[in-house]
């Protein structure tokens, strides 16, 4: 049974309202993994990926969460709004990206587990 997802106007708070397709996110991941150049200057990308808190290798850069997965630096952003969840993560040094999109309420934990499992499999295959 299909049901229509309700629309919530979240435009007044810093959450949600960035909509994309997996194909466009894959293109964006390719730009990030290439180190920028077409969309972002390499210097801008480096600054966006730098944690903004002093003396930190992890945390929040400019629009990206800077983290670590199995010893590899990760850059990404995940989120959820009513009816939609997403996980977007790139591993720059391994030249890998994982994008998972879902259309279920409060599914961000499940989406993160799927993304982490896929990332683990890809890293094992690559390394």
Image (cartoon, rainbow, N blue to C red):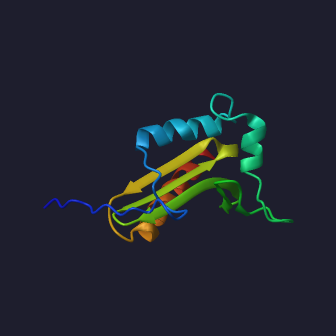
Q: Residue at x 57, y 57 (%)?
A: 77
Q: Percent position (x, y) of residue 116?
A: 52, 61
Is 47 situated left or right of 78 in this image?
A: right
Quadrant occupied by the N terminus: bottom left
| Most distant residue in the front direction | 12
For residue 32, which quarter of the picture?
A: top right
Between residue 21 and residue 94, name the one nearer to us: 21
Between residue 107 and residue 98, name the one nearer to us: 107
Marker count (numbered): 0
Q: Percent position (x, y) of residue 59?
A: 71, 64
| Most distant residue in the right direction | 55
Q: Residue at x 41, y 65 (%)?
A: 81
Between residue 109 and residue 38, name the one nearer to us: 38
**Image position of 113 with respect to 96: above or below:** below
For residue 22, which quarter of the picture?
A: top left
Q: Percent position (x, y) of residue 7?
A: 31, 60
**Image position of 87 with respect to 96: above or below:** below
Is 3 situated left or right of 105 in this image?
A: left
Q: Percent position (x, y) of residue 39?
A: 63, 32
For residue 45, which quarter of the picture?
A: top right
**Image position of 123 with respect to 8: above or below:** above
| Most distant residue in the top direction | 38
Q: Residue at x 40, y 54 (%)?
A: 101
Q: Residue at x 16, y 59 (%)?
A: 2
Is 8 situated left or right of 30 in this image?
A: left
């Amino acid at each position: 049974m299909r049901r229509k997802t309700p629309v919530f106007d979240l435009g007044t708070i810093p959450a949600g309202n960035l909509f994309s397709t997996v194909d466009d996110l894959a293109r964006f991941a390719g730009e990030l993994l290439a180190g920028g150049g077409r969309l972002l200057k390499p210097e801008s990308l480096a600054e966006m990926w730098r944690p903004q808190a002093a003396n930190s290798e992890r945390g929040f850069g400019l629009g990206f969460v800077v983290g670590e997965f199995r010893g590899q630096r990760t850059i990404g952003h995940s989120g959820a709004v009513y009816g939609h969840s997403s996980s977007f993560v790139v591993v720059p040094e391994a030249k890998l990206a994982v994008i998972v999109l879902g259309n279920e309420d409060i599914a961000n934990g499940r989406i993160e587990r799927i993304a982490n499992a896929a990332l683990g499999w890809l890293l094992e295959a690559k390394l």
